[in-house]
Each structure stands twice: as structure tokens, then as C-alpha cells.
Amino acid sequence: MLDIKYILSNLDEVKGFLKARNSDLNIDVLTELDSKRRKIIGETEDLKAKRNEGSKRIGMAKSTGEDVNALKEQIKDLGDEIKTLDTELADVENKLHEILMTIPNKLSPTTPIGKDENDNPVVRTWGEPRKFSFEPKPHWDIAEALGIMDFERGVNLAQSRFTVLKNAGARMERALVNFMLDLHTKQHGYQEIEPPFMVRSAILEGTGQLPKFAEDLYKINNEDLWLIPTAEVPLTNLNRESILEEKDLPLYYTAYTPCFRREAGSAGRDVRGLMRQHQFDKVEMVKICTPETSYEELEKLTSNAEDVLKILELPYHVVNLCSGDIGFGSCKTYDLEVWLPSQNKYREISSCSNCEDFQARRMNLRYRPSDGGKTRFAHTLNGSGIAVGRTLIAIIENYQNEDGSINIPKALIPYMDGLTCVR
RNA sequence: GGAGAUGUGGCCGAGCGGUCGAAGGCGGUUGACUCGAAAUCAACUGAACGAGUUUUCGUUCCUAGAGUUCAAAUCUCUACAUCUCCGCCA
């Protein structure tokens, strides 16, 4: 959520980035609603001050045994007037809040302007795509032949876009989770968290998935609980509604969780294989820091994610998401895209974002500066560290051999009890 | 799931329907004392919103929401959470 004061005093700027985001949201109503709000607050506070004073006088009169009926008569009607105004005020504030909650974040000056994913500039590239002496197969062919993935059984147990991992496949998924968590906790300084996998609506509003993107989420029947679409949600909300001390910042959190997404609107995309599932595993990284350091922290966060790919020796590149492709709550996002030989292109495997104070304002996450000044909203960042299922895909495809076996990346061998090859 | 108890500021803990943002303590900050520290003493010590913006004034917040009243931390109702006992269960 953006600060209403910021919006009203920078209307043109706000309209500019709405346009850059391909949003046709009309924010002119905000001006009117806000002045209406101020007017009602002034009126109701005057009345309340009058009532408080009257009530105080009644109290004093009563203690000296005076008759208070006349005084009561004087302020009797104030209560009704106040109630009417308060209701009006609540209406206006709800309307205002509703609109504010649907306005996307502003953009960093370093976020390129562009229409869609084709306009995302490549920032850097790491590694060389391997030259195959044979036609590389897609991961689903290899994995099914090796008996480490069962797509039919996944569908049978749940529905399409669910998969069963078996034997070395299941084992490698677990190995990757442990490898990533060890890397982030031991090398990168993150605290390991295991959060709830279901959260309340207010929590999803805090990070921005609600109210706008309910159709992407799974909701529990008859309860105010939703399955998390990413660990970003519980991790970022971990310190919500509190005032942190600057000396305790930055906070680094990492967690492994399954993620649940409806994938509404992606019909027909990546229907084969493990690429786009309703349930997938992810190791997430979240940071809470001061405004002064958040862009520096974004660079570090991104390189923490890159380290996973470097150590696993998977070629990738980093793109800077343009204004038309960037997420609702992010000011700046780097996507890591890993090389997939069967598709002959780079595919998203991590997304690292600086949300500045957008989420913090929604969840009332503040900190007190060391100099004792006024409380400020913290900055929040999140990044995949990284998507586990897609890493498994990348390993299978990049490490495949002509005979259908797959080598295990060096760094992963200890996590596989010394297994060097799945055949 | 059933029965009972409880829910006050960073923490502990008072609080008769009236002058309570809330006694007292702990913690924290600053100052005094000290070569320094500890101890001691003193002062200060929540947030948000609105108006003015140098000092200020007003409103709201005692788990959340609703109600009674001129007035609610204090009374009523509902929800949620915690604790104890019983049941069930990984």
C-alpha cells in the first residue's frame, strides 16, 4: 500500500507508473475521498471534545451533590450526532482503504519501462549452456523412464498439475532442500524458520496477494485460512504489527515450504512435466531492513540465490523485470532464469524483489531509528532461494547422459549418500 | 469437541461507571555521584490520526467487534487467544 499523502502530493508521478505497469486504474476519486475524510474527522473530533468536557463536568457536579439533569440535557444529542458522523467516516475510510489496497507499488528508477517479458533486459549471464552430442530430452521423458517421477499417479491422486516423485527423484528433492537451507543458514546468515503453511486473510493482505489475487489461491472451506502460495507470505508477516529496533535490522529469514497455487489463467502453459504445478517446494529468503540499505540488500539477496545455481553448476542469466512484467507489490525485481536444454531457452527459477515499504505499510511493520526519531516503515525483500522442483528439472535436463541416466551435481553428492549417478 | 478460569502499556501488576493513557514495580534513556563500573539519587520514558507547525492543541487506542450510558479499562453480548480439567489424537 502506498501512503495516501504521497499519492495526493505526487498524482502525476503515480499516474505515470500506473501507466508503465499497463494499469488503467483511476485514482482521481482519492482526492475527493480524502478531503471528505478530513472534514468528517474535524467535525466528529469537535463534537467529541465537547462531549468529553460535558461529561467531565457532570462527574464533578455529581461528586459535590449538585443536580446534573440540566447538564445531561445539554449533551444528550451529541452521542447520536457523533455516531452518525463516525459511521460516515468509517464508510469513507473503508472506501479509501479498498482503493489503496488495489493500487500497485511504485517503481524503482532502475526498473526499465517496458510492455511485457520481452522487454526485460538481461543483466548478466553465468555459465555456458552445454553442447550435447545427442538430442537432449525433456525432463519428463528422462524422469519417467528412470522411474523417479510418476505424472499419471499424481493426477490420479489429486488432479492435473500434481506429480508423484519416487525413489531418487523424491530423494533429490529432499537433498536439494537441505542443500539450499544449509547454504543460506551457514554461508549467507539467514535464520531458518518453519512457518504455518496456512494463513489468515489479513496475512495475505499484508504481502499483497489479497484482495486482488484471490483466484490464484487455495482457500480452506468454511475457515478464514488459505494455503500459502509462497513462504514469502508468513516470513514477511513474521514481525507484522510491531516496532523493531534499528539495531536489530536487517533480519534475514529462510524457510523451506511447499507452495500452493491455483495457476488460474495459465491454462495450456507448461502442461507437461514438473514446470508448473499446483503444489511445489521452494526455499524462500526474506529480508527486513531500513530504507537506506534495501537496494544493497536486494543485490546481496539476488547473489545468494545465484550461488545456488553456481554451486550446482547450472547455467543461468539474470533479467531485470520491466514495468509491464513486474509484480504488483515490487519496486524492482531480478528474475533468475536457468538454462533448459530441451526448451533451448532460459526459464524462471527465482524471483528477487524489493518491495520497499509497500508491504510494511500494509502489515504495519515499523522500526525505531537508532537516533530516537519517529518510527518508520521498514523495507521488505523476498526472493526464491530457489524453486526446488524447477531445480530438479534443470539438473535432470542439464546433467542427462545419452543412455538416459543423470549425473548428480558434485555439491549434491553428499546429500545423496554418495550417489553419483541415477540410472 | 465438553466444562471452568483469564485476557490492562516492552514485561510484571493495581484499577469503586466519572478529572485514567491508566498507580506501583521491572526494563530503557538521560543527568548527578565515580578515575571507570556497580550501587544510589533525580528526570524522562507508547502509538496513530487531525489542526497549527517554534513552544502547542484536540481525538482515538486497556485482545477484537457490537451494545447500554451524558460518561466504559470498569456493565452486557459475540468472537478470538491463553491456562486448567475431561475426551480424542501424530
Image: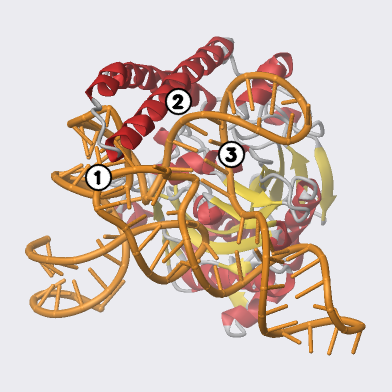
- Quadrant (top left, top right, bottom left, bottom right) of the C terminus of chain A: bottom right
Up-down: is A197 above or below B89? Answer: above
Provide residue A200's location: percent of width, then percent of height.
38, 47
Amino acid at pointer 3: Arg
> What residue is shown at x 45% (from left), y 25% (from top)?
A49
The quadrant where residue B55 appears: top right
Q: Is residue A147 left or right of residue B48?
A: left
Provide residue A415's location: percent of width, then percent of height.
60, 79
Residue under disc 2 on the same chain as residue under disc 1: yes
Q: Nearer the viewer, mark 2 or mark 1?
A: 2
Up-down: is A406 above or below A420? Answer: above
Please give the chain letter of the residue carrying mark 1: A
Q: Please give the residue where the numbered disc 2 appears in the rendered image.
A: A49
Please give the chain letter of the residue carrying mark 2: A
Q: Earlier in the sequence, mark 3 or mark 1?
A: 1
Amino acid at pointer 1: Asn
Residue under disc 3 on the same chain as residue under disc 2: yes
Q: CA distance from mark 3 to mark 2?
A: 30 Å
Residue under disc 3 on the same chain as residue under disc 1: yes
Q: CA distance from mark 2 to mark 1?
A: 46 Å
Q: Please give the residue where the numbered disc 3 appears in the rendered image.
A: A361
Q: CA distance from mark 3 to mark 1?
A: 29 Å
Q: Earlier in the sequence, mark 3 or mark 2?
A: 2
Give the SS element for disc 1: loop
Q: Please give the residue where the numbered disc 1 appears in the rendered image.
A: A221
> What residue is shown at x 58% (from left), y 85% (from top)?
A417
Q: Give whichever of B83, A420 is nearer the camera.
A: B83
Number of numbered markers: 3
Amino acid at pointer 2: Ala
